Amino acid sequence: MRSRRRLAIGAGGAIVLLASLDAYVIVTVLLEMTKDLGIPANRPERITPVITGFLLGYVAAMPLLGQLSDRFGRRAVLHACLVAFALGSAVTAAAEQFSLLVAGRVVQGVAGGALLPITMALAGDLWSERRRTVVLGAVGAVQELGSVLGPLYGAGLAALIGWRGVFWVNVPLVLAAMAAIHFTVPPTRPAAPGRVDVPGGLLLAGGLGLLVVGTYNEEPEYGVLPPGGAQMIAGGVVLLVLFGVWEARAKSRLLDLTGVRKSPVFAVLAVSLLSGAALMVTLVDVQLIATTLLGRTSAEGAFLLARFLVALALAAVAGGFVAHRYGDRWPLVAGMALAAIGYLLVSGWPLDPAAASYGPLPRMDVDLALAGTGLGLAIAPVSSAVLRLVPAGQHGVASASVVVSRMMGMLLGISALSAYGFHRLQSLTAELTVPLPFGNPNFKAEFEVYQAGLREALHTEYREIFLITSGLCLLGAVVAASLRRPPSDLPHPAKEFAV
């Protein structure tokens, strides 16, 4: 029995990793996608639905499909989600039209978003409350591992089999995962299935969807938002408010906080949301800096991003030890403050950041490592704080809520900052004209002037976006500093700090 449940949670962890990898793999293959599908290189705003579509499906589906597994059984819903994930991967890989590419990514996101809460619920089924937290922590760590390995995994596979191969390879991996799930996860349905909060799930998905659509602007030269964007954003806010009202009164909730002090939980989730926004901006914009300002390939951009990712992974481990020894408040504050400093330094990069250094150390390496260390330090304390604040019976849902909030931050952060950034770039380049080579004896000199102006505009855009990101991390540090630890949770020489 013990070995079988370990195999079951191992199979669940493997599919959580697969979905997490696909959430982050996109950042290193975006340029290849745009070229293959004929999207102009100077219109990067048109590719953003590939990122936001996946994240929207992931966030919207995660809590609702987790509840469906309570109703219909873990194995049945896992199989259904894996089939959908394989289908979405195949559509993405075979897409020759942009709309099909986005549709495939949305299906991937919806299916992938369900895998984490179902696997966490499976841990609750198979382990007692006393031992469950360790298993939940391991599953959460696998989810975080995807953010570190995803960009590198995508760059490596794309170099070998192209960007389409990155998604085709999911199909055999899903088939293997389905076989493992079939033989390890019990098929029985829970004895007392609960209600599924469909209205809550629809309100959450609708609110987030309107926010994302309201910030997606194919013509950023005319404004930050598209026509009707302000109204859609207002509608999204209204739906999210209604979601909050519904969750407060509904008998079956996506996140049940009955008997829990809500303000500290929401504060922790707010820090997770802000760190998610900073993470996604880094993954996308560092790659863009590498391919635009530095003229490097996507693989070289992924290698540059590795400075940030390795620091994030190492700091995540260190943050867990620090939170275990001293509690979760101060590692959260220190991590977000350190990230704010790192992004402030990144915003100050010169036009040629590769030439800048701190003595013998390349400036880009140091600044990215500093930002990654800060965000990494906050990962474990966020999870441990939520687990400390909610009863053991709700640890699975609470752990999933941390990921939901972080993904929501990634979704809203990349949507809002992209809308601002693309509009800002268009305004900065409004006076630039592309010289024509035909019959123009001064074409070479004029083209050099145009390229210099474009580089200056890109540099200004990136600087402002990272300055805003620094402010978001500083806000996260302030929110984290507001947390207070209950007296009963103070460290005791003979008592291990419980997470």
Image (tube, helix red, strand yellow):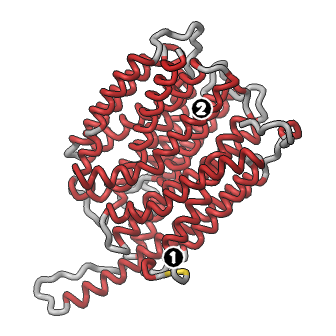
Q: Quadrant of residue 370?
A: bottom right
Q: Amino acid at mark 2?
A: Leu
Q: Secondary structure at mark 1?
A: helix
Q: CA distance from mark 2 to mark 1?
A: 38 Å
Residue highlighted by disc 1: 363
Is any atom of residue 232 visible in this view? no
Residue lying at 19% horizontally and 45% vertically, measured from the top left: 96
350 up-or-down from 271: above or below: below
Residue lying at 61% horizontally and 21% vertically, measured from the top left: 127
391 up-or-down from 92: above or below: above
Is any atom of residue 358 visible in this view? yes
Label 1, residues with CA under 10 Å away: few <14, some 14-19, many ≥20:
some
State how many labels appear. 2
Q: Quadrant of residue 140?
A: top right
Residue highlighted by disc 2: 136
Q: Is residue 334 left or right of residue 103?
A: right
The answer to which of 241 and 114 lies nearer the viewer is 114
Residue lying at 48% horizontally and 43% vertically, measured from the top left: 210
Residue lying at 59% horizontally and 54% vertically, measured from the top left: 376
Spot the residue most to the right.
487
Q: Position of residue 245 (x, y in %)?
A: 67, 31
Q: Position of residue 274 (x, y in %)?
A: 61, 52
The answer to which of 411 and 70 lies nearer the viewer is 70
Q: Quadrant of residue 110?
A: top left
Disc ID at residue 199:
none
Q: Amino acid at mark 1?
A: Arg
From the image, which quarter does the C terminus lie in? top right
254 up-or-down from 269: above or below: above
